[in-house]
Amino acid sequence: MQADTDRCATFHRLHACGCFVMPNPWDVGSARALQQMGFKALATTSAGFAWTMGRPDNQVTLEQALEHLRLIAAAVTVPVNADFEGGFAMDPQTVAANVKLAAATGIAGLSIEDSTGDETNPLHNFDLAVERVRAARQAIDESGTGVVLTGRSEGFVCGRPDIDETIRRLRAYSEAGADCLYAPRIDKVEHIAAIVAAVAPKPVNLLINAPFMTVAEAAALGVRRISVGGTLARTAWAGFLQAAREIADTGTFSGFERLPNVDAMFRDR
């Protein structure tokens, strides 16, 4: 569809200069609310989506993820980046096949991680990890969609916080065709600056899931894109759990004060 192609082109332009925030909705309502606030792009969160199903992160099937991407992309007019986890496969050929399916959902971007889910061997072998990104690149090119490919290195998430290895992997993913590079849980200024310099001129995504940096400070370091992962979803869960626990524990309802008029946000749609 022309609209999907236009959103991919818009997403590429957003990465060309400056710094933009791409918050992570977890359902259609949160996606529409974020678009109304003026954000220029959105990103799905695998964790936030999994929690809506009563599951932990990484416990969603490929079919469920694809349907979620279709719903979110169709709900808004801004570009949507997909948290596509590890491509829902290990071997590059199946990653490529799954990436083609994702590219057909209306998304404007997707990421491929290098984590295995195995605590004893949490990162894919370097060569395999690079081949997986290369396969995703080829799949996107063959799809003709122009979807933005993000290469993710998960060392700081899965217990291998080695900045030199992270940079080695991100450089290799860039050379394999990733349009954007991303290492979640990087929160030190020197590490952020080192990654930006190492993969330049490719854009870098920074996860901000705690108040350790402002948008202006990230932009000054050369970061082009900021996401928040599942943190907005966790913020919503925090309010829900606090109010519900008060009812369960004390029988009082103080959490019901100063609430937003959510219905009014969607009334004119």
Image (spheres, rainbow, N blue to C red):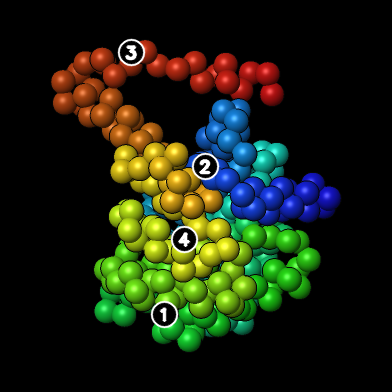
Say which residue label 3 marks. Answer: 257
Residue topped by disc 2: 21
Do callouts 4 and 2 mark residues in contact (Cβ within 8 Å)?
A: no
* Mark number, residue 196: 4
Q: Can residue 36 be seen in this view?
A: yes
Q: For the residue marked with disc 2, what is the amino acid?
A: Val
2 vs 1, front mark: 2
Classify mark 1: helix, strand or loop. loop
Distance from label 3 to label 4 (Cα)?
44 Å
Check residue 205 in the rendering and tell me which mark sits there, or answer none: none
* Amino acid type assigned to the residue bearing label 3 in the image: Glu
Q: For the residues carrying marks 3 and 2, which lies nearer the camera in this image?
A: 2
Earlier sequence position, callout 3 versus callout 2: 2
Give me the residue at 67% from left, 41% from top.
78
Q: First in sequence: mark 2 or mark 1? A: 2
Question: Is residue 162 depicted above or below 4 in this figure?
Answer: below
Comparing marks 4 and 2, which lies closer to the viewer? Answer: 4
Estimate the x, y position of residue 255 in percent, counting from the top left. Answer: 29, 19
* Among the 4 quarters of the image, the one containing residue 41: top right
Q: Earlier in the sequence, mark 1 or mark 4?
A: 1
Circle 1 is placed at which residue position?
124
Of badges 3 and 1, nearer the viewer stands 1
Q: Are marks 3 and 2 in contact (CB under 8 Å)?
A: no
